[in-house]
Image (cartoon, grey):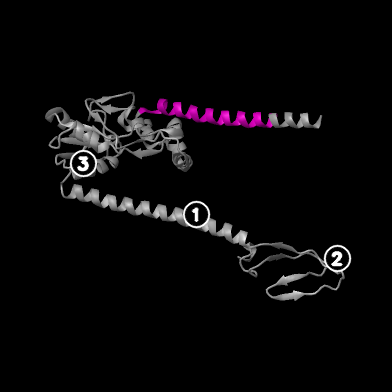
Amino acid sequence: MEALGLGLPPLYTLSISHCNRRNEHCGKISGTTCRLKSSKPSYLKLTPPYRIHHEYSSVIRMQAVEEDTDLKQMKDMAAARKRWEALVREEKVKVLTPREAGYAIQLSNKTLLDVRPSMEHKKAWVKGSTWIPIFDVDNRFDAGTLSRKVTDFMMGGWWSGVPTLSYDNQFLSKVVEKFPKDTDLIVACQKGLRSLAACELLYNAGYRNLFWVQGGLEAAEEEDLEREGPQPFKFAGIGGVSEFLGWTDQQRAAAAKEGWAYRLVFSARLVGVFLVADALFLGAQQVGRYLQDIRSH
């Protein structure tokens, strides 16, 4: 605290310098006065402490706001999970495995409502399903959204490939426009969490024949559901650097089945990344030497 000037007198923080004579110190600290024997006073640097107090208080306030926001999000998520568990426990929403969902679609002509965002849906989707995302990629470019995008990217988006998502306020109206409230709806997302949120909204809106795919489409085997799209369901939710290097759980599981040929592809990519990084480092060194030679001449 004293280093910040918070434990010193309220008006000024005094920087102590050496006197020109006998190396004696001068200044006023904690109410004690040191008198100089030299006729020439030493130099005293006065620093108004209100700047330090203001900056310190600003940092504390910012940290408190971030902690309050994180705490609120944690509480909201915990409360939401309790509501969703109650929906399932009270059988207001019926639970289906991916395989059971496939049977229900084929034998009972039930509709599968895909609520995943666009970057997951375009990789793989169930044939004949209806896509209405509850959250989708946020394409706005206002200051607040850009700040969120930068934060999400720095906090792991570069690794996982998950972009900034935003809630679609028209989700419920789109579903109501498409399906009567007595329709049997099988609701699915990638991992089973967003689809539970969708089930809660739909139930509160009056839908009573709701089925939730437990574990999401990621838990589906290829024979469970009739798939369309370029990738398996399990790979639809991965991306970023982790996907490029093959370091996701889904890719490790696939590598265990496929064998060394599958692993060699990603091993080659990893070696390539190291070679590119090394080349960039050497190139930066050469440019630095070149600029130094230009300055010296």
Mark 2 in CB contact with mark 3 (< 8 angstroms): no
Q: Amino acid at mark 3?
A: Leu
Q: What percent of the width, then of the height, locates residue 228?
A: 28, 24
Quarter of the image holding residue 43?
bottom right
**Magenta span includes 271:** yes
How many marks the image carries: the answer is 3
Residue 250 place in picture, x, y as percent: 36, 35
In the image, residue 67 lies in the stretch drawn in magenta: no
* Above-or-below relation of 183 to 155: above
Q: Secondary structure at mark 1?
A: helix
C-alpha separation, residue under disc 1 versus residue under disc 2: 45 Å
Please tell me the numbered disc located at residue 202. 3
Q: Is residue 52 left or right of residue 27?
A: left
What kind of element bears circle 2? loop
Q: Residue at x 75, y 32 (%)?
A: 292
- Label 3 sits on a secondary structure element that is helix
| Pointer 1 or 2: first along the chain | 2
- Residue 62 is tagged as 1
Q: Which residue is mark 2?
A: 20
Work out which quarter of the rendered image holds the C terminus and state it: top right
Mark 3 residue crowding within 10 angstroms, few (<14) / some (14–19) / many (20+): many
Of residues 237 and 149, which is closer to you in this image? 149
Taking depth in this image into account, of 57 and 66 the one nearest to the observer is 57
Which sits earlier in the primary sequence, circle 1 or circle 3?
1
In the foreground, 54 or 255: 54
| Residue 121 falls left or right of residue 144 | left
Asked if residue 10 lies left or right of residue 22, the reply is left
- Amino acid type of the residue tagged 1 in the rendering: Met
Q: Earlier in the sequence, mark 2 or mark 3?
A: 2
First to last magenta residue range: 258-286
Q: Residues within 10 Å of mark 2 (few under 14, many from 20)?
A: some
Q: Which quadrant is the N terminus positioned in? A: bottom right
